[in-house]
Image (spheres, rainbow, N blue to C red):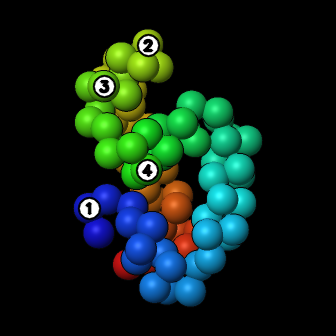
Amino acid sequence: ITNFDVMAAEENGATLQEIDNLLDKLGAIHPRLRSIVEMKVFEGLPVDEIADRLQVAPRTVARNWAFCREWLREQLKLE
């Protein structure tokens, strides 16, 4: 999976409520992480636009997005 996919998560048995709970946990690690996932997954924004909105470097967004993808995969046990 190149992108975290809500549909794939649901197919593996995760409910939308569980996904929202995971986003809350991710936001507790750092609020920017939740924002990045929401903008990337739900709004479909590219890294550069997310960086502009958050006023951080695109490299920061890319690094945070990589962390978020892996963290969510681990939490949901996606392969």
Residue at point 26% right, 36% down?
Answer: 46
Q: For the image shown, how many numbered marks are present on the structure?
A: 4
Identify residue type, mark 4: Phe
Q: Position of residue 73 (x, y in %)?
A: 47, 67
Q: Which residue is mark 2?
A: 55
Is residue 13 rendered to the left or right of residue 60? right
Identify residue type, mark 1: Thr
Which mark, by number, is residue 49?
A: 3
* Quadrant where the N terminus is found in the figure: bottom left
Q: Which residue appears farthest toward the top when viewing the image?
A: 55
Is residue 36 rendered to the left or right of residue 60? right
Q: Is residue 18 above or below residue 27?
A: below
Asked whether the beta carbons under mark 1 and mark 4 sit within 8 Å of each other, the answer is: no
Please report whichever mark, 1 or 3, sits nearer to the chain's N-terminal start. Answer: 1
Q: CA distance from mark 4 to mark 3?
A: 14 Å
Please report whichever mark, 2 or 3, sits nearer to the chain's N-terminal start. Answer: 3
Which mark, by number, is residue 42?
A: 4
Q: CA distance from mark 2 to mark 4?
A: 19 Å
Residue at point 43% right, 56% down?
Answer: 69
Identify residue type, mark 2: Gln
Q: Is residue 52 above or below residue 64?
A: above
Identify residue type, mark 3: Glu
Q: Which residue is mark 1?
A: 2
Is residue 39 rendered to the left or right of residue 14? left
